[in-house]
């Protein structure tokens, strides 16, 4: 089915299975939809079924229109009126939930650029502005820029149901991103894909942060440490909902990593942060990532590490082959820490998540001298096993030593005993001291108890004398009264 010119406006088709032309009135009568008998596929409306947009079928919830490859010859000839009519028909369909105008049905980084340019976007969204049913819009890998974003602004500001917008691969540059970001401020947008869009400078205004944003993709741009500093506003926001932040293939270096890591120390919402293919990130930057998820500087620091982040990207603990990397490599250590976080994913209680993941990290790294030594070296932390065990309450040392033996074997138990011997002796001495103090106070209690009993006996004797005195006085008073009467 295509949009093309025709002099006839009144031909019709008897059924959806026909193969003749199915005409619809246009703005100026110069073109029509053509229906060629393309069989419907599941819930999608394809180029052969565009007339179904007006039929309003409940089972047709997705529009897929390829803007290159086989269909490019069709849509590339559409007039501005045709694009506007498509927008109006989409806006008039109450069941349509998804609109995909892309070069390929699935993402393909080798696909040709689609024909949807600024002019076509202006016409499309002129008709689409009042649409209220769309929840997902996919316009990736087309050829629009800032002008295309400007044409979307009224629709984005008015939309009450749009959850996902994908404009990946369109050259909107920094100005286009700024316009887009402000336009979605009050929208219910949850997923925003702006990768490979020529964005260099990012400005995040605290007053223009979408309240429900969960995924932000900015891969393949030119974001530097200054851009990272702006993005931390999303991470530090008290009620942030951001779970996925994709920044691969940018201009981020160790400074940018440090900025992001600092913001993530107390963040419990972000789950995935992709930083791979940023070639300026060195071993130092990876060490900062490792310290974020497992700070080996102290037991307290380990317990307070980030326990919700599960991904940094390929090469940063997210590759299966990193299991095969040398166990002392920083990638392997990062992978291990992230795996611990993954194991506790899904828990509703964040406090329970932090407690269990933190305890696991303490047992597997702090209480294992070899692991701890390796992590201290990678994080540039001084190694001192005695200092580690000095952090532990001496009264808990026996239990800790039992955990070491149970999880790491006799050799590690020996190391732990040597490192904690002073604490164990202090535990024994303190125990004897406490026992002596208990005996001392018990003897004092007994002594005072005896004193109390003596005092109570004396009080009882005094009370008895007082009672006898009252009886004698009463008797004398009674005898005197009788003598007067006589």
Image: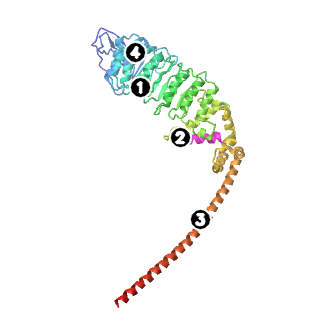
Sequence order check, earlier mark of 2 and 1 = 1
**Residue 26 percent coordinates (x, y):** 30, 13
**Whole-number angstrom distance, CA of label 4 to CA of label 2:** 46 Å
Among numbered discs 4 and 2, the one appearing first in the sequence: 4
Q: Residue 461 carries which label?
A: none
Where does label 4 land, which residue? 121
Compared to residue 317, the image places residue 86 above or below, namely above
Determine whether the residue tagged by mark 3 lies in a helix, strand or loop. helix
Q: Where is residue 319 in the image (x, y as percent from the top left)?
A: 60, 29
Q: What stretch of residues is rendered in magenta?
A: 350-367
Depicted 382 relative to depicted 229: above or below: below
The secondary element bearing badge 1 is classed as loop
Could you tell whether 75 is left or right of 233 in the image? left
Q: Residue 445 carries which label?
A: 3
Q: How far apart are marks 1 and 4 (CA)?
A: 21 Å
Prevalent SS, magenta region? helix
Residue 434 point in image, percent of width and height: 64, 57
Q: Which of pointers 4 and 3 lies earlier in the amino acid sequence?
A: 4
For residue 185, which numbered disc appears in the image? 1
Mark linked to residue 353: 2
Look at the image and tell me in which quarter the C terminus lies: bottom left
For the point 36% across and 88% down, the residue is: 484
């Amino acid at each position: 089915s295509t949009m093309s010119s025709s002099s006839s406006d009144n031909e019709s088709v008897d059924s959806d299975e026909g193969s003749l032309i199915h005409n619809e009135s246009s703005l100026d009568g110069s073109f029509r939809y053509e229906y060629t008998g393309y069989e419907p596929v599941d819930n999608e409306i394809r180029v052969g079924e565009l007339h179904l947009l007006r039929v309003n079928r409940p089972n047709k919830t997705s529009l897929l229109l390829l803007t290159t490859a086989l269909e490019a010859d069709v849509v590339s000839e559409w007039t501005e009126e045709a694009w506007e009519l498509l927008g109006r028909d989409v806006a008039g369909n109450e069941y349509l939930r998804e609109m995909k105008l892309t070069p390929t049905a699935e993402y393909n980084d080798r696909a040709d650029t689609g024909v949807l340019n600024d002019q076509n976007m202006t016409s499309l969204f002129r008709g689409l502005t009042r649409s209220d049913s769309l929840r997902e819009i996919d316009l990736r890998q087309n050829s629009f820029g800032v002008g295309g974003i400007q044409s979307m602004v009224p629709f984005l500001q008015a939309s009450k149901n749009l959850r996902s917008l994908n404009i990946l691969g369109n050259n909107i540059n920094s100005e286009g991103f700024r316009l887009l970001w402000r336009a979605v401020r009050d929208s219910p947008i949850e997923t925003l894909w702006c990768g490979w869009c020529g964005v260099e400078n990012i400005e995040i205004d605290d007053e223009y942060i979408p309240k429900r944003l969960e995924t932000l993709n900015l891969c393949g741009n030119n974001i530097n440490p200054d851009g990272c500093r702006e993005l931390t506003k999303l991470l530090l926001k008290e009620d942030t909902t951001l779970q996925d932040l994709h920044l691969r293939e940018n201009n981020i270096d160790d400074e940018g990593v440090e900025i992001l890591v600092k913001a993530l120390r107390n963040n419990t919402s972000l789950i995935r942060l992709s930083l791979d293919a940023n070639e300026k990130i060195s071993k130092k930057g990876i060490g900062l990532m490792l310290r974020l998820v497992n700070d080996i500087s102290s037991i307290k620091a380990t317990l307070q590490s980030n326990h919700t982040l599960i991904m940094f990207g390929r090469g940063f603990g997210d590759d299966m082959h990193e299991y095969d990397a040398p166990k002392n490599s920083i990638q392997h250590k990062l992978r291990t820490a992230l795996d611990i976080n993954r194991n506790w994913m899904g828990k509703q209680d964040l406090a329970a998540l932090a407690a269990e993941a933190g305890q696991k990290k303490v047992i597997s790294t702090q209480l294992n001298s070899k692991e701890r030594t390796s992590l201290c070296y990678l994080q540039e932390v001084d190694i001192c096993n005695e200092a580690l065990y000095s952090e532990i309450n001496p009264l808990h040392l026996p239990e800790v030593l039992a955990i070491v033996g149970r999880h790491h074997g006799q050799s590690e138990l020996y190391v732990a005993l040597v490192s904690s011997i002073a604490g164990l002796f202090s535990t024994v001495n303190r125990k004897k001291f406490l026992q002596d103090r208990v005996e001392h106070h018990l003897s004092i209690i007994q002594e005072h108890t005896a004193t109390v009993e003596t005092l109570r006996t004396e009080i009882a004797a005094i009370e008895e004398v007082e009672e006898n005195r009252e009886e004698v006085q009463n008797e004398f008073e009674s005898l005197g009264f009788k003598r007067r009467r006589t």
